[in-house]
C-alpha cells in the first residue's frame, strides 16, 4: 500500500490526492459489493483475511483460588476477561472449566442476597447428610481424611463444571448483569480453573 503513495509523492501533491481518490473509490465499491456498512465490518470479512491469519488460534491459561466457605460464589469474571485479552484472540469462544467434582462454574448475577437464595435452593435440593457416598465402610481405598461430601457432588451435578462464552474484539461478551462464578460446594480448599480461548 505504501509503495504507490511513495511513488506518487515523488510526482507531487496532486498525484497523492488523485491516488487517494482512486483508493477510496475502490474501497467504496468493495464495501458496496460485499454489503459492509463500515470499514470495521469490511476488515472482518473472511475473504479479506490472508491464509495465515485465518487459522484458528488457541490459548490455554489457568486460574487458582483458595475458597473460604461452603457455598461461596467467587466472581472470576475479571480474571477470565484478563486471560481473554492476553490470549490475543479477537473473535471466538472462551471455555471456563473447573477441575473439580464439587466446585462448579456458572453465569449469574452478583447480588449478595441472591447468593443466599442460591445457597438455600441448593441445600433444599441436596441437603448435607444421608448419602451412600458418605458411607466410608463400603467404599474402597478411601484416604483417612476423605470428606463426607455426597451433598456437594449432588449439588455439582445440578450445576456444571464449565461455561462457554462468546469473545468479541478481545472482550468477554456478557450481558450487563452477567458474571462468571466459581462456586465452592464443599469445605474451603484450593481450586483450579482452566480457561481456554479459541478463535481468530
Ligand atoms: Zn466425594
Image (cartoon, rainbow, N blue to C red):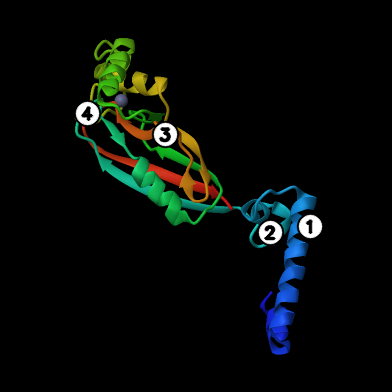
Q: Is residue 69 above or below residue 132?
A: below
Spatial CA span between label 2 and label 4: 50 Å
Earlier in the chain: of badge 1 and badge 3, it is 1
In this rendering, the label closer to the viewer, 1 or 4 = 1
Spatial CA span between label 1 and label 3: 38 Å
Pointer 1: what residue?
29
Pointer 2: what residue?
49
Q: Residue at x 23, y 28 (%)?
A: 146
Label 2 C-beta lies within 8 Å of the nearest ligand 1 atom:
no
Spatial CA span between label 1 and label 4: 63 Å
The picture quadrant where one finds residue 130 is top left
Spatial CA span between label 1 and label 2: 18 Å
How packed mark 2 is, by other alpha carbons closer than 10 Å (few <14, some 14-19, many 20 or more), is few
Left or right? Give the position of 133 relative to 167. left
Choose between 68 and 46: the one closer to the eye.
46
The answer to whether residue 161 shows anywhere in this view is yes
Regarding ligand 1, which quadrant of the image does it lie in? top left
Earlier in the chain: of badge 1 and badge 2, it is 1
In this rendering, the label closer to the viewer, 2 or 4 = 2
SS at mark 2 in the image = loop
Earlier in the chain: of badge 3 and badge 2, it is 2
Amino acid at each position: 500500500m505504501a509503495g504507490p503513495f511513495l511513488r506518487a509523492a515523488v510526482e507531487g501533491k496532486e498525484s497523492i490526492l488523485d491516488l487517494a481518490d482512486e483508493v477510496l473509490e475502490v474501497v467504496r465499491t468493495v464495501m458496496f459489493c460485499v454489503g459492509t456498512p463500515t470499514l470495521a465490518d469490511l476488515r472482518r470479512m473472511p475473504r479479506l483475511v490472508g491464509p495465515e491469519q485465518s487459522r484458528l488460534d488457541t490459548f490455554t491459561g489457568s486460574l487458582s483460588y483458595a475458597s473460604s466457605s461452603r457455598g461461596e460464589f467467587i466472581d472470576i469474571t475479571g480474571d477470565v476477561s484478563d486471560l481473554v485479552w492476553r490470549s490475543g484472540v479477537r473473535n471466538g469462544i472462551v471455555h471456563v472449566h473447573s477441575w473439580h467434582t464439587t466446585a462448579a462454574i456458572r453465569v449469574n448475577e452478583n447480588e449478595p442476597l441472591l447468593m443466599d437464595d442460591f445457597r438455600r435452593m441448593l441445600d433444599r435440593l441436596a441437603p448435607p447428610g444421608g448419602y451412600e457416598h458418605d458411607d466410608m465402610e463400603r467404599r474402597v481405598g478411601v484416604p483417612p481424611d476423605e470428606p463426607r461430601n455426597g451433598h456437594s457432588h449432588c449439588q455439582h451435578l445440578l450445576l456444571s463444571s464449565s461455561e462457554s462464552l462468546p469473545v468479541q474484539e478481545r472482550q468477554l461478551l456478557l450481558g450487563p448483569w452477567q458474571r462468571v462464578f466459581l462456586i465452592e460446594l464443599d469445605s474451603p480448599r484450593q481450586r483450579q480453573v482452566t480457561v481456554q480461548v479459541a478463535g481468530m
